[in-house]
């Protein structure tokens, strides 16, 4: 574990705060009047999911968490458990609680390879591709002249997630979704 000074605590770093791994969501170093600099941060506990606002002062240091990313291939979901296998060794299967993946669990597709983040040999988070393609499984028909509400409708994509898309998207279309925000980005192909 490397030691980070207060100004090295920047977004996307994983640090150990009060004995727990935390991802730095945002940081802002500033000086208040004649005082010493302070780094005001937002941390997300990777085990608890709670977001904390913490200020680190000039004389404070933290440890960077020793994390490791390992690829995992999704197999199936069943009763709150998500089963994965090692992409190189299909016999090596393991399960992860669905609660650990939070909202991202709805983006799992068969044979999808994601990176699982390990800390002290424990799975604490998962990294999905930022943009993924999904087939629209259910879409209400477009109504002519319905653009007064902004021109969006809610559709269901494979995996069961629902998203807002433009009116021209139909059932069977392939759409690209940003998995960080859960928003539609573009239509890849028409049905």
Image (tube, rainbow, N blue to C red):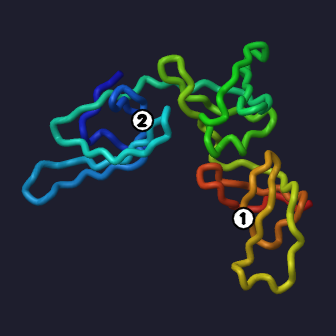
Of residue 104 and residue 8, the one placed in the foreground of this image is 104
Name the quarter where the N terminus is drawn. top left
Name the quarter where the C terminus is drawn. bottom right
Give the labeled residue for mark 1: 164
Q: Disc 2, disc 1: CB below 8 Å?
A: no
- Marked residue nearer the N-terminal end (2 or 1): 2
Mark linked to residue 87: none
Please indicate whether residue 126 sits to the left or right of residue 74 in the image: left
> x and y percent of residue 108 in the render?
74, 40
Mark linked to residue 22: 2
Give the SS element for disc 1. strand
> x and y percent of residue 165 in the render?
74, 66
- Residue at image coords 44%, 41%: 44
Give the SS element for disc 2. strand
Q: How crowded is mark 1: few (under 14 residues within 10 Å), some or many (20 or more)?
A: some
| Alpha carbons under labels 2 and 1: distance apart | 31 Å
Query: What is the residue that sits farthest to the front in this orientation?
Result: 79
Q: In which quarter of the image is residue 83?
A: top right
Q: In which quarter of the image is residue 73?
A: top right
- Residue at image coords 37%, 47%: 42
> x and y percent of residue 161 in the render?
75, 51
Please indicate whether residue 15 sits to the left or right of residue 179 in the image: left
Above-or-below relation of 131 to 188: above
Q: Residues within 10 Å of mark 2 (few under 14, many from 20)?
A: many
Of residue 7 and residue 165, the one placed in the foreground of this image is 165
């Amino acid at each position: 574990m490397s030691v980070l000074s207060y100004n090295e605590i920047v977004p996307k770093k994983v640090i150990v705060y009060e004995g727990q791994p935390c991802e730095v969501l945002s940081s802002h170093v500033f000086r208040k009047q004649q005082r010493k600099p302070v780094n005001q941060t937002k941390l997300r506990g990777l085990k608890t999911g709670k977001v904390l606002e913490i200020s680190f002062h000039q004389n404070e240091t933290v440890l960077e968490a020793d994390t490791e990313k390992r690829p995992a291939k999704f197999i199936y979901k069943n009763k709150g458990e998500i089963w994965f296998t090692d992409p190189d060794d299909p016999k090596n299967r393991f399960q992860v609680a669905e609660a650990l993946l939070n909202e991202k669990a709805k983006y799992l597709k068969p044979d999808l390879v994601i990176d699982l983040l390990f800390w002290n040999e424990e799975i604490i988070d998962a990294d999905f591709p930022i943009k993924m393609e999904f087939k629209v499984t259910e879409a209400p028909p477009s109504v002519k002249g319905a653009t007064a509400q902004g021109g969006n409708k809610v559709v269901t994509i494979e995996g069961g997630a629902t998203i807002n898309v433009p009116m021209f998207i139909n059932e069977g279309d392939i759409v690209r979704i940003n998995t960080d925000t859960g928003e539609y980005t573009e239509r890849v192909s028409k049905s």
